[in-house]
Image (cartoon, grey):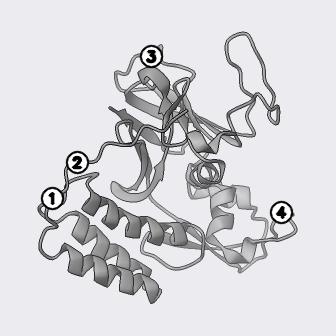
Amino acid sequence: MSARPAPVPPASRTPIGVEERLAAARRQFDLGMLEAARKLARQAMKMEGVVEFDPTWRRCVEIIDDVDRRLMNSSAPAKEKGFYRVVKGDSLARIASRHYTSVGALIRCNESLHREDGRDPIIRPSQSLSYIQGTWSIRVSKQHFLLLLYLDGELYRVWTVGIGKENRTPAGRFLITEKLTDPAWTPPGRYIAAGDPDNVLGTRWLKLTPTEGTDSSLEGYGIHGTTEPDTVGTSCSAGCIRMRNEEVEELFDFIPMPGGSTPPVRVSIEE
C-alpha cells in the first residue's frame, strides 16, 4: 500500500520574528530549559502569519513536542506538574485515581519508579511523586494524518496516525470510554485473540463513544496500535485511528481510566 502524502499549505514567507524565536527555543531546549523553550515555540506558533499545519507551524510544534515528550517521561519540573508525598497505606493505583491519572503515567513521570527487571515499582512513605495535572483532550485531523493532544486547551503532543481507507473514519465528537491492554480484535463474526498474527490492533485500545450530537450508531471505533507500523500516515484501516505501538502506549498511559468521578477525555475527529 502506498502512502498518501499529507497535504501541506503552499509555502509562504516566514513571518518576521518567528525564526528568532525558534532559534532561541532550540537553544533553550539544548540547555535543558524546557519550559522556556516551550514558551518561545508557542509564541512563534501563535504569531500573525503562521498558518496551522503549514511548514512553519510544524517547526514550532516539533519543539513543543520534543519538550513535552521529555516532561511526560521524566521528573523534570513544569508548571503543569503537581507533587504528591506518599503516606502509609498508599498504592500507585489509589494515587493515580485521586489525581485523575494512571499508574503508567506515574511511572513515566518518576525515574524513581523505573525498574529494569520489569517488576512492579515499590513506593515508600514520604516519597515524592510528580504527576501531570489538568484536562486532556484530543483532536484528529484526517486530512493531515495527525492526532493532536491538548492539556487544558494548549497543544501538548502531536503524533502521525493512520485513518480509515475510503473515508471510513467518521468525523464527529466522541468520548474515550474504555481502555484495554493487548486487545482482542472482533471483526464481524470473528474473535481474534491478542498475539494472533491476524490481530492488527497492536498493544492498546481506546474506545470511542459518540457524544454531543454525533450519530449514536457510530460504535466500534477506537484509537489503537498496529502490527503494521508502515501503514501509519496512510488511509489504511477499517475506520479506526491507527498509531505505532510505542506511541499509542505513551498516549494510553496519560489517558485516565474512564468512569467514576474522572473527567472524560473528549475526542474531536475532523476532515
Residue at coordinates 71% horizontally, 20% vertically from top-left? 186
Using the image as rendered, state which of residue 45 and residue 109 is in the foreground.
45
Q: Residue furthest top?
A: 189
Measure how far apart labels 2 and 1 are at the Cα level. 9 Å
Residue type at mark 3: give it: Ser
Residue where numbered disc 4 is placed: 120
Residue where numbered disc 1 is placed: 12
In primary-sequence order, the first of circles 4 and 2 is 2
- Horizontally, residue 15 falls left or right of residue 84, namely left
Q: Are marks 4 and 2 in contact (CB under 8 Å)?
A: no
Position of the N terminus, as image quadrant, is: top right
Vertical position of residue 236 compared to residue 233: above or below: above
Q: Are marks 2 and 1 in contact (CB under 8 Å)?
A: yes
- Horizontally, residue 199 falls left or right of residue 213, namely right
Label 2 element class: loop
Label 3 element class: loop
Disc number for residue 9: 2
Q: Are marks 2 and 3 in contact (CB under 8 Å)?
A: no
* Residue 168 visible within the image: no
Label 4 element class: loop
Residue at coordinates 67% horizontally, 34% vertically from top-left? 201
In primary-sequence order, the first of circles 3 and 4 is 4
In primary-sequence order, the first of circles 4 and 1 is 1
